[in-house]
Structure formats: C-alpha cells, structure tokens
Image (cartoon, helix red, strand yellow):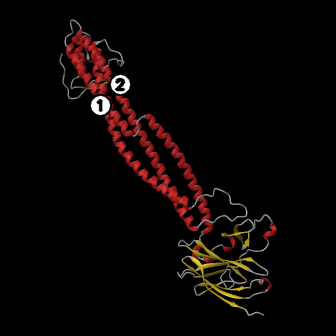
Amino acid sequence: MSLRRIPKQECWNVAHRTWVRVGGVDVRAFVAALGMTLGLGSGSRAEAASPAEPAPSRVSRDPKQAAHEAASAEAAALEAKNGAERLAAEAVTLADQHRALASSLAVSRAELGKHWRTAQSAYTLPKTAVPVGKPAPLPKLSALKTAKSEYEAFIHASSAVVKDERTLRASEARLEEHAEAALTSASSAKTAAQQAQDSAAALHKVQAEKPAPPNAKAAAELADAQLKSARGAATTAAALAQKARSKSGFSTAAAYTSKQTAAASDAEKAKAQLALANATLREVDARLSLQNPEVPGCDWHKVPWRDMTYPWLPWGTLKHALQLKDGAWVCDEPDHDNCVGPPNLGDISPGPDSALILGDLDGDGKPEAALQLLTFCCDVSSFEVLIFKQDAQCHLEYVDEISFANSSASFSGGALVADLPFARQGENMGLGAVSGMEHAEWRLLNGKLRKTKSVKSVAPLQ
C-alpha cells in the first residue's frame, strides 16, 4: 500500500464532515488503499469521502470504518485542542483587559464614595417634619454650596461608573463564555480520544485474526499513533480549559452566577442612591434659590426685595419664613386676627427715605446692602435691619440683622450708623420716656457684623 506524503494535515472531521490532513499522510489515500488491501471494497476516493459518523461509545467492527474513525478522532481531538488553545489565549487577553478595567473602576468607585460622603456630611434631606410653631433649621450657605457641588459631582461620576460597571459585567460574561467553551472543547477532545481508542482496538482485533490481512499491522500501528496524538490533545485541552477557567476569575459557573446576582443587587442599591442624590440636589437647589438668589446685573436695586421670601426671618405663630408681596406680609396664620399690620417694606427706590441703603462695610470697595424692614408700629416703631453682601457670582448672601426702635440707619465712613434712643429701667419709650441716645456703629470684620462703636449720652433728669 502506498501512502502519499503531503505538506499539510488532512483527515475526516466528524463534526463538520470535511477532510483535514494529519501526520503528513493523505488519509483518504491511505483508507482507500487499506480497504483494497483488506479486501473490504474498492477503496475508492468517493467511498472514503463520506463515512458515516460513528457513535463515540461504540466500537466499529468494520476495519475500514475503524481506520476512518481513528483518523477522524485524532483530527477532532486536535481541533478541540486548538480551539481550547485559542480560547485560553483569548481568555488571557480578556483577563488583562478585565483587570485594567476593574482597577480603573475601583478608583472611580472610591472617588464616587468620597463625593457621596462629603455631600452627605454637608446636607441631607430632613428625616422628620418640623414641629408646628418651630422655625425650620436654616442650613449654612457654605454647606449648601458644598452639597450642591458634591451632589452634582456624584451624579456626573455615577453615570460613568454605571457605564463602566456594565462594561465590567460584559467582560466577566465573555470570560465565563470562554471558560465554558474551553471546557466544552476539552470534553470534545476527551470524547475523540475515547473514539480513537475504540478504533485502535478494532484494528488490533483485525491484526489478531488468522491469517491477518496484509498491512493490518501497519494500520494498527498508525491507529496507535493517532490514539497517542488524540490523548495528548485531550490532555492539553483539559489543561488549557483549566487555564481559561482560572483566568475567568470564577472557580465554577455557579460562582459566576452568584457574582452576577450580587452585582445586580449592588446595581439596584446604586440606582436607589442615585435617586436619593437627585432628590437631595433638588432640595438643595430650592434652598439656594431662597438663601442665595441672584442679584441681577450685580445691581442691588434690581433685587425683588418687595416680592421675595426671607428664610432668615421666621415670622408669626407658625414661624414660617417671612414672605412679602408688594412689600406686605403674606400671612398664613390660622387666626387671621394675627395678620393685621406689619411686617412691611417701604419704598426701596434710591433716595433719602429709601428702605434700602448701600455702603461699604468691609473696605473691599464693593457696597453691602442694609434693608430696613418695619416689624412693629404705632407707639414704638421697630425695625429689623437685614445686612447682605454679594458673592463672586453676584448672588445675595445674608450676613446678619440688627433690631432698631424709633430710629433708622445710614452709612457713614465705612460703617452702618444709628442713633438709638433708650429708656431707663422701668420707663416706657412708647409713652415718650427717653432717657438718652446711643450712637452706635457696625462694621464687617472677617465676614461678621461687629459693633465697633457705642457712645451713650444720658438726658438730664427732669
């Protein structure tokens, strides 16, 4: 029997029913020649080209078919080994990419957590309602600005982290697919090796016959070589499958499923956290619109003083933030008898009688505003003087307030000044009893309103 040497491997692939070359031998020529030698058919190329696919667990009793099975089993094992090798190599690359992504994501998560903790320490949504008749606590403006910045940063970073999380989950899925596919290839290689063993056994039975057909020994030896090759391929495929499995980061498919379940739970928690961040940011923005409204064009006279809410001044029995409309108190008292009279805000147009006066209290060359709000009238006129400044973005910032009686304030020499009448203990200014006058001055020092001068003059006893 003549075996034609060829440069590439070729043998019957059971899975794809195609011929491949193995061992540098043209298997179709060999099988055809073997069939003729054994007297089991013409051994034509056409007959050898499409053998029936043998069941892996059944030993073929047809020597010609056994030769086909041995060659195709070796080819299948080699193909499975090559597949496992490719999958393992891809798993290595994927694992490197996965590690880089996981490392980057860990940094992003840490930054996200930092934004969250800072935002939460600055401002959180109230957990309980404010009791009736108690003023709502007023958050510090600096805390609100910090909270706004940090919640915005958290929300922005969250979208990137969610996207990276999805990419990481997809990466884990691909690694798991490669691990499972490599295990399938290893299983296929093992099945092929068993088939090669069955085929070799069948040829050895032919060789043991008396008399043995010509070239039966050569056929059996070739089958042994193919069996050895198939077993080696199966062993290699199993090792490669284990490598792919280890690169996946999951010891078993069940471990992968468990990780995905935990990841889904974490995603729901992150979703709830993001919803809370958005809700808190809306609340922060609402508070900032009240506590830090814009000064249009940085012009104090363009602030809607007579139509705005003053969260710094709780009023009435309910202690709600004072709200003015057309300069008058918008009363929401349950007893409407309490809604008579002040507070109210007079004319704020520039002029000597304006309720809004401007002056530089801290020496920075920029004017602060003093708003004189009438809070009580008749026998004694009382005023709450609210002091404001502007931040770098031309937004209003509340500084402090001063209470005056029967007086008004003005700016002079970089200070807020007022001449305040006072009465001795037991006397009533409402009845005209004035014991003297106090000349007082206030300035802004380190951002705080401080009384820097107080001179009292006592009226002589009558």
Judge whether residue 36 can be spotted in this image. yes
* Residue 460, horizontal then vertical, whole percent: 74, 93
Q: Secondary structure at mark 2?
A: loop
* Residue 243, horizontal then vertical, whole percent: 34, 36
* Residue 54, horizontal then vertical, whole percent: 35, 18
Q: Residues within 10 Å of mark 1 (few under 14, many from 20)?
A: many
Using the image, determine if residue 299 lies above or below residue 3. Answer: below
Which quarter of the image is occupied by the N terminus?
Answer: top left
Q: Residue at x 68, y 80 (%)?
A: 355
- Disc number placed over residue 15 in the picture, else none: 2
C-alpha distance separating marks 1 and 2: 20 Å
Q: Report the side of 428 relative to 50 (left or right).
A: right
- Disc number placed over residue 411 in the picture, else none: none
Q: Quadrant of residue 314?
A: bottom right
Using the image, determine if residue 59 lies above or below residue 75. Answer: above
Judge whether residue 29 can be spotted in this image. no
Amino acid tagged 2 = Ala
Q: Nearer the viewer, residue 1 or 451?
A: 451
Q: Which residue is mark 1?
A: 236
